[in-house]
């Protein structure tokens, strides 16, 4: 008799119920083909990986350009909306400036007209009762005068410098230029010598005239003058000229001429004519003992401007 196969000892693993249907089992367990599975895994891996650097740079550049275009568009729209308002405000400002300028011009014309009226009234008052021939009128420069006198011309030295030189013992800076204090001393010397009326470059001097300096310019009653300075003084002939030379101012002028090269020329004139002051400032007072004065007490008025 054939031998029976020897059975293995131990527990046996139960067989699957669908063991006899292996093909059907494989189809149900693996519904997706291996090729499709690998493709799906590749797509998932690509989605989780970072983008290449050139691609990211292009994306950032595109985003920046888009943002800049948006900002420019918004700015242009805002400027277009605000343009009418700015133009209107500018036109209003220009109109206000023009109106203010017109008002200023009108006020200046009124001031000039009032000054002319005041000057005319002063001349009329001085003309009454022979006041135009009085010493007060001469000192005030209210009327034109004529007579014999001296024409004195003072000019800078030929080597006049723009800058200042070293000052000497007398305080004179050796620049070769005529200064305001030089003209002051000469004018005071002419008054001391007996001048009755003086003008500098056609500018009539009065008892209240001032000679000052503004930088390198010399001002007479706040009006700038340029050299040469021509001084006309009515006071007589040769005797008057000799009297001026004998004054300290005459000696000072001679020193400027001899030591510093200041050009000085003196000429006697028989018929000098000096104009009236452009806007004479007059002070009035009541003489002592005048019935119109309060108890004979002088009453000084304010200076007219």
Image (cartoon, rainbow, N blue to C red):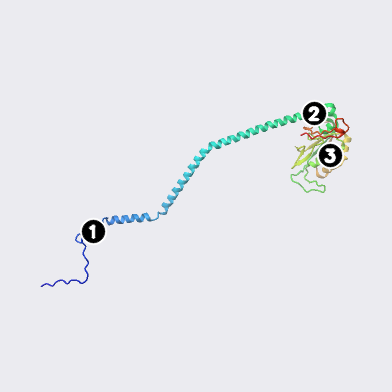
Q: Residue at x 33, y 56 (%)?
A: 42
Q: Nearer the viewer, mark 3 or mark 2?
A: 2
- Provide residue 128's location: percent of width, then percent of height: 83, 26
Q: Residues within 10 Å of mark 2 (few under 14, many from 20)?
A: some
Front residue (pair 283, 272):
283
Point out the tag, 3 or 2, that comes first from the N-terminus.
2
Q: Is residue 42 visible?
A: yes
Image-quadrant location for residue 119: top right
- Provide residue 201's location: percent of width, then percent of height: 78, 35
- Judging from the image, what secondary structure is the residue with disc 1 in? helix
- Judging from the image, what secondary structure is the residue with disc 3 in? helix
Residue for badge 1? 26
- Provide residue 95's location: percent of width, then percent of height: 61, 33
- Judging from the image, what secondary structure is the residue with disc 2 in? helix
Residue 43, compared with residue 141, is above or below; it is below
Taking the view exactly as shown, the residue that stands out farthest to the left is 1
Residue for badge 2? 123
Cα gap from disc 2 to disc 1, whole angstroms: 138 Å
């Amino acid at each position: 008799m054939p031998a029976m196969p020897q059975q293995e000892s131990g527990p046996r693993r139960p067989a699957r119920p669908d063991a006899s249907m292996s093909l059907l089992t494989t189809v149900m367990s693996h519904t997706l083909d291996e090729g499709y599975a690998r493709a799906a895994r590749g797509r998932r891996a690509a989605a989780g990986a970072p983008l290449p650097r050139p691609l990211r740079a292009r994306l950032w550049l595109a985003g920046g350009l888009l943002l800049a275009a948006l900002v420019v568009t918004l700015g242009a729209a805002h400027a277009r909306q605000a343009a009418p308002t700015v133009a209107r405000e500018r036109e209003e400002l220009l109109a206000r400036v023009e109106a203010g300028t017109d008002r200023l011009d009108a006020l200046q014309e009124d001031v000039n007209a009032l000054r002319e009226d005041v000057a005319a009234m002063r001349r009329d008052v001085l003309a009454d009762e022979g006041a135009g021939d009085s010493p007060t009128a001469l000192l005030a420069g209210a009327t034109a005068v004529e007579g014999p006198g001296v024409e004195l011309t003072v000019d800078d030295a030929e080597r006049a410098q723009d800058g200042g030189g070293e000052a000497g013992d007398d305080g004179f800076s050796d620049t070769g230029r005529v200064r305001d204090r030089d003209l002051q001393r000469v004018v005071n010397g002419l008054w001391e010598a007996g001048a009755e009326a003086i003008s500098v470059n056609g500018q009539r001097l009065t008892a209240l005239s001032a000679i000052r300096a503004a930088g390198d310019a010399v001002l007479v009653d706040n009006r700038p003058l340029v050299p040469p300075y021509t001084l006309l003084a009515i006071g007589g002939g040769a005797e008057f000229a000799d009297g001026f030379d004998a004054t300290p101012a005459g000696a000072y002028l001679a020193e400027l001429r001899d030591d510093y090269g200041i050009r000085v020329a003196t000429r006697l004139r028989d018929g000098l004519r000096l104009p009236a002051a452009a806007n004479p400032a007059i002070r009035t007072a009541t003489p002592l003992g005048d019935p119109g004065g309060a108890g004979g007490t002088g009453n000084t008025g304010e200076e007219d401007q």
